[in-house]
Amino acid sequence: MNYEQVGICYATGATGTYLEYIGNVFLIPTVPFHNPFTSNGSSHNAKRSSKSIFYAGHFHLDPIKYPSHQCKFLDRSYKMIWIKVYEKDFDKFKMVKKSKTTSFTPLIGPRHGKVELDNLTTKIINELCDLPYSLDQEEKWLKDKSPFIFDWNSFFSQDTFFAELEKLCDFCSIKFEITKELVSIHEEFLNRHSFVQPG
């Protein structure tokens, strides 16, 4: 069966590559089961195939200011998903983003010294923890694209995540099945985010 491609639009740090992995490994399989996680808990080791259906990107960003985040993929995507971070979850979102950036070391020369390096690292982390979109920008993107809204907070409980995946599968007209591998990989996701309270 041929499927149209599905775009996953998400703010930086909102777990878009993990949802892409789930889509391409479990929902409409185009790559074999594998472990997508990096040492800091991101899913940037996820594999893609030329036949992959799900593709994550920061498509909501202004294409003039951020041309590298736009691609021809959007011209042929049939459906779009928006991973929405609700205002009640902003503090949790910032905590998750910070956890994934604390291991980041800026590439600067040794002449800058430890104090300046620490200050620069802190500055970069603080900037990354700001929400990278305005609510007005989000509202316009949602209106233009009419995407499926995927609740970011649902990632942090197996029950809510699987319920959200089932709704997504309805949206994509595909059958949702819970497999041992899906349960196993999401348990690892939850273990890597054990500092995040569900709900």
Image (tube, helix red, strand yellow):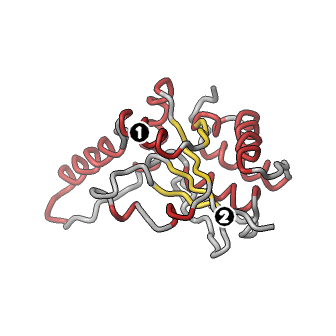
In 3D space, how far apart are the residues under numbered discs 1 and 2 (Cα atoms)?
25 Å
Query: In which image quadrant can residue 82 be found?
Result: top right
Residue 124: percent from the left, percent from the top?
29, 49
Q: From the viewer's perspective, tell me whether residue 16 is left or right of residue 198.
A: left
Q: Residue furthest bottom?
A: 50
Q: Which mark is residue 140?
A: 1
Quarter of the image containing the N terminus? Answer: bottom right
Q: Please give the name of the residue rendered at 38% of the width and 33% of the height, measured from the top-left corner.
A: 135
Residue 199 in percent (x, y) is at 63, 26
Query: Residue shown at 83%/51% (left/top)?
Result: 175
Secondary element under disc 2, as helix, strand or loop, is loop
Query: Nearer the viewer's eye, disc 1 or disc 2?
Result: 1
Q: Which mark is residue 104?
A: none
Question: Hey, what amino acid is under mark 2?
Answer: Ile
Say which element carries label 1. Answer: helix
Q: Residue at x 63, y 62 (%)?
A: 5
Residue 127 vs residue 168, the one in the foreground: 168
Eyeballing the image, is 188 above or below 198?
Answer: below
Amino acid type at image mark 1: Lys
Which of the two residues, 142 or 15, is positioned nearer the viewer here? Answer: 142
